C-alpha cells in the first residue's frame, strides 16, 4: 500500500524559493573578485537566478547540459548553483587551482557547453579556449565594463548583460528528483580526476543532513562564511544549507588570505565557518601575531584533511572558537562524519573529551559506515582494529560520470573510500591514513597522520608531512618532512627527541628533513605523491 502524502520531488530550486519567501530580507554578502563588496537579499538572489535560467533557456540549454564554472565564492556563483540546476541543467564547478592540463581534461571530459568565469581567470581561459572545443560560449562573471577590448573567446559576453536582458518572471519547473544538478571532479590527489554527478534528491537530503545540530548545525541565527571554495565539493553544501535554514551567507570571493578573511569575519558578524586545516593554521598564526580576537565567530568546521589536535586546542583556548572535526569526500557530497560528543561522554575529563573530538566523528542519519579487513569481513568497533572504510547512503556516489569502468562499489553496494580507519564503541570513526599513504614497516602499519599531528604540536613546527621511505630491513620507515616556524631554531635531533615516549617506539620517524614549503593539492591538502617523487631514492639505515 502506498502512503497518501504529496509526492513533491526534491529540487534545489525549492530551497532558494523557500529562502526568498520566508527569509526574503536575509542577506548574501560577497567580496567581488573585481573589487568591492556586493550585498543583496535571498529574494533578490532568487529573482536573479531566474533571470539566469531564462538567459540559459534562450541559449537553448537542454536538460542535462553541463555549464562549467571557474569561480570564487560570490553571489554570481551562488546564482549559477540555482539558475543552472533549476532548469534541469548541470552546474559543473571546476577547481581553477588545478594544473592547466587537468582543467582541459575535466572540461573536455564533462563536455561543458558554457563556461562562466571570474575576471581573475580571464588570462587562464584565454589559454584554455583553443583546446576546449565543446565550449560554445564563455561568460565573464562581471559587468560589461570588465570585458577585454579584444578576445578570441567564442561568444564572449558579460554575465550582467546576460541577466539584464531577462525579467526574472519565471516559475521553477518540476521534474524527477533524481535528475542531475551538479558535477564535481575529485581533485586527483591519488588518481586522475573523476566526476561525481550529484542529483537534486541527494543534494537536498545532504543539505538537511548537514543542518542537523550534531552535524554542521545551521540556524537562522547563524551568519555563515564558507571559506571552503564553492568549487570544492559545493563548499561542503553550505550554499544550500544556508538558504534552507535562512542563515545569512557571507562569500569571501578571491580573498582567502588571513587578513581579508578576518576583516569579513568581523565586519559581517560571522558566527560559523568551514575550511581545510591549512586555512586555519595560517589564520591562527595571524591571530597570534596581532593578538587579535574574534567578536562573533564561535564555531568552525575543519575537514578535507586531518585536523591536528593542537589546532583544535589552540582555537578553543586562545580564540574561544570550537572546531568540529569532520570527514568526507567528493564522493560523499561531502559530509560523512562529524565529531560531536554524546550525552554519555559529558562526564569525561577535558583531556578525554578532546581526544574524542579529535577523531573524525560519527555519522548522521543518511550515511552508514563500516570497516573491513583484507578478507572483506567486518571488523569490531573497538577503537583498535583498523581496516578499509566503506560507506553507503542516499548522498554517496554510485558510479563516476562517464567513467567507462565499473564504480568502486562492493558487490553488496558499499562505496570503498580508500581510507583506513578505526571505529570505537561509541561509533566515533578515526582515519588512520589513506590506504596509499599508510606506512608498512615490517608487519606493522604506521599512521602518517598521527605522526604529522604530533609534529605540529611542537612549537617550532609550522607544517609537517610524513611519508614512507625505503629501508632494507623494514621495507618502509617514516620520514618526517618539516617546515620550521619563521624565525625559530629546531634541529632534527631535537624534533626526534620530541617523539620519544609520545608514540610507540616502532612508530618514531627515522629521519627529519627540513624544507621551505610543502607541496599542496588544489584543495590545500598535502600532496604526498609529489613528496614521494621528491624523496624517491631516499633510504634510511
Ligand atoms: P581527493 O580525494 O581528490 O583529495 P576529496 O576532497 O574528495 O578529494 O578528498 C577526500 C579525502 O580527504 C578522504 O578520502 C580522506 O582521505 C581525506 N579527508 C577528508 N577529511 C578528512 C579528515 N577530517 N581527516 C583525515 N582525512 C580526511
Image (cartoon, rainbow, N blue to C red):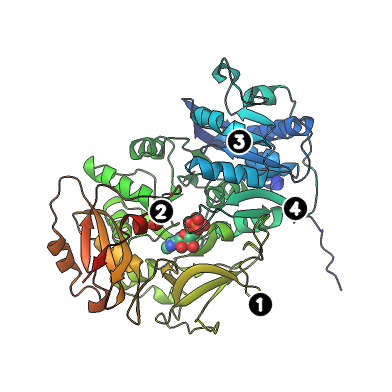
State which mark lies toward you, 3 or 4. 3
Q: Quadrant of residue 477?
A: bottom left
- Give the residue at mark 3: 131
- Residue 292 in picture, x, y percent from top left: 27, 42
Tell whether label 3 touches label 2 (CB within 8 Å).
no
Please report whichever mark, 2 or 1, sits nearer to the chain's N-terminal start. Answer: 1
In this picture, residue 103 sits left or right of residue 92: left
- Towards the viewer: 103 or 431: 103
- Towards the viewer: 137 or 182: 137
State the CA–CA distance, disc 2 to disc 1: 32 Å
Q: Quadrant of the N terminus?
A: bottom right
Is 221 above or below relative to 538?
above
Disc 4 crowd, CA 10 A, few/some/many (<14, 14-19, 20+): many
Disc 1 crowd, CA 10 A, few/some/many (<14, 14-19, 20+): few
Tell whether label 4 touches label 3 (CB within 8 Å).
no
Please report whichever mark, 2 or 3, sits nearer to the chain's N-terminal start. Answer: 3
Please report whichever mark, 3 or 1, sits nearer to the chain's N-terminal start. Answer: 3
Q: Residue at x 22, y 57 (%)?
A: 513
Is 149 above or below relative to 489?
above
State the CA–CA distance, disc 3 to disc 4: 29 Å
Disc number placed over residue 525 in the picture, else none: 2
Q: Quadrant of the C terminus?
A: bottom left
Disc number placed over residue 412 in the picture, else none: 1
- Give the residue at mark 4: 179
State the CA–CA distance, disc 3 to disc 1: 41 Å
Q: Quadrant of residue 88?
A: top right
Amino acid at each position: 500500500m502506498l502512503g497518501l502524502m504529496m509526492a513533491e520531488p526534491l529540487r534545489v530550486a525549492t530551497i532558494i524559493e523557500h529562502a526568498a519567501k520566508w527569509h526574503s530580507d536575509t542577506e548574501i554578502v560577497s567580496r567581488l573578485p573585481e573589487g568591492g563588496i556586493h550585498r543583496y537579499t535571498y529574494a533578490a538572489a532568487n529573482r536573479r537566478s531566474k533571470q539566469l535560467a531564462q538567459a540559459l533557456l534562450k541559449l537553448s540549454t537542454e536538460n542535462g547540459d553541463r555549464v562549467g564554472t571557474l569561480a570564487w565564492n560570490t553571489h554570481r556563483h551562488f546564482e549559477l548553483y540555482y539558475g543552472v540546476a533549476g532548469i534541469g541543467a548541470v552546474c559543473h564547478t571546476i577547481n581553477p587551482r588545478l594544473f592547466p592540463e587537468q582543467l582541459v581534461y575535466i572540461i573536455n571530459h564533462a563536455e561543458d557547453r558554457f563556461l562562466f568565469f571570474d575576471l581573475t581567470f580571464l588570462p587562464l581561459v584565454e589559454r584554455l579556449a583553443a583546446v576546449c572545443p565543446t565550449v560554445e560560449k564563455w561568460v565573464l562573471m562581471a559587468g560589461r565594463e570588465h570585458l577585454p577590448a579584444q578576445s578570441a573567446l567564442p561568444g564572449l559576453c558579460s554575465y550582467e548583460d546576460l541577466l539584464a536582458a531577462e525579467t526574472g518572471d519565471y516559475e521553477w519547473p518540476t521534474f524527477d528528483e533524481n535528475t542531475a544538478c551538479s558535477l564535481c571532479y575529485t581533485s586527483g590527489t591519488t588518481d586522475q580526476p573523476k566526476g561525481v554527478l550529484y542529483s537534486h534528491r541527494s543534494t537536498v537530503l545532504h543539505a538537511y543532513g548537514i543542518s542537523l545540530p550534531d552535524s554542521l548545525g545551521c540556524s537562522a541565527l547563524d551568519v555563515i562564511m564558507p571559506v571552503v571554495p564553492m568549487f570544492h565539493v559545493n563548499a561542503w553544501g553550505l550554499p544550500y544549507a544556508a538558504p534552507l535554514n535562512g542563515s545569512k551567507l557571507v562569500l569571501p570571493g578571491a580573498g582567502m588570505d588571513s587578513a581579508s578573511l578576518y576583516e569579513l569575519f568581523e565586519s559581517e558578524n560571522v558566527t560559523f565557518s568551514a575550511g581545510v586545516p591549512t586555512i586555519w593554521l595560517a589564520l591562527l598564526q595571524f591571530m597570534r601575531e596581532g593578538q587579535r580576537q574574534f567578536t562573533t565567530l564561535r564555531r568552525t568546521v575543519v575537514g578535507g584533511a586531518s585536523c591536528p589536535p593542537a589546532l583544535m586546542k589552540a582555537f578553543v583556548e586562545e580564540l574561544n572558537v570550537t572546531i568540529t572535526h569532520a570527514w568526507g569526500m567528493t564522493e560523499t557530497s561531502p559530509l560523512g562524519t562529524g565529531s560531536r560528543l554524546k550525552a554519555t561522554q559529558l562526564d569525561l575529563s577535558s583531556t578525554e573529551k578532546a581526544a574524542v573530538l579529535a577523531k573524525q566523528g560519527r555519522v548522521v542519519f543518511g550515511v552508514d559506515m563500516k570497516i573491513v579487513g583484507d578478507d572483506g569481513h567486518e571488523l569490531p568497533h573497538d577503537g583498535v582494529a583498523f581496516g578499509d572504510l566503506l560507506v553507503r547512503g542516499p548522498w554517496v556516489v554510485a558510479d563516476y560520470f562517464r567513467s567507462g569502468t565499473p564504480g568502486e562499489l562492493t558487490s553488496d553496494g558499499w562505496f570503498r573510500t580508500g581510507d583506513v580507519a578505526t571505529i570505537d564503541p561509541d561509533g566515533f570513526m578515526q582515519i588512520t591514513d589513506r590506504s596509499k599513504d599508510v606506512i608498512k614497516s615490517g608487519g606493522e602499519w604506521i599512521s602518517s597522520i598521527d605522526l604529522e599531528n604530533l609534529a605540529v604540536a611542537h612549537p617550532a613546527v609550522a607544517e609537517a608531512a610524513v611519508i614512507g621511505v625505503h629501508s632494507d630491513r623494514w621495507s618502509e620507515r617514516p620520514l618526517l618532512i618539516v617546515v620550521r616556524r619563521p624565525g625559530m631554531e629546531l634541529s632534527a635531533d631535537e624534533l626526534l627527541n620530541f617523539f620519544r615516549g609520545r608514540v610507540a617506539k616502532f612508530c618514531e620517524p627515522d629521519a627529519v628533513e627540513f624544507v621551505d614549503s610543502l607541496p599542496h593539492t588544489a584543495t590545500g591538502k598535502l600532496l604526498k605523491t609529489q613528496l614521494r617523487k621528491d624523496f624517491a631514492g631516499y633510504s634510511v639505515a
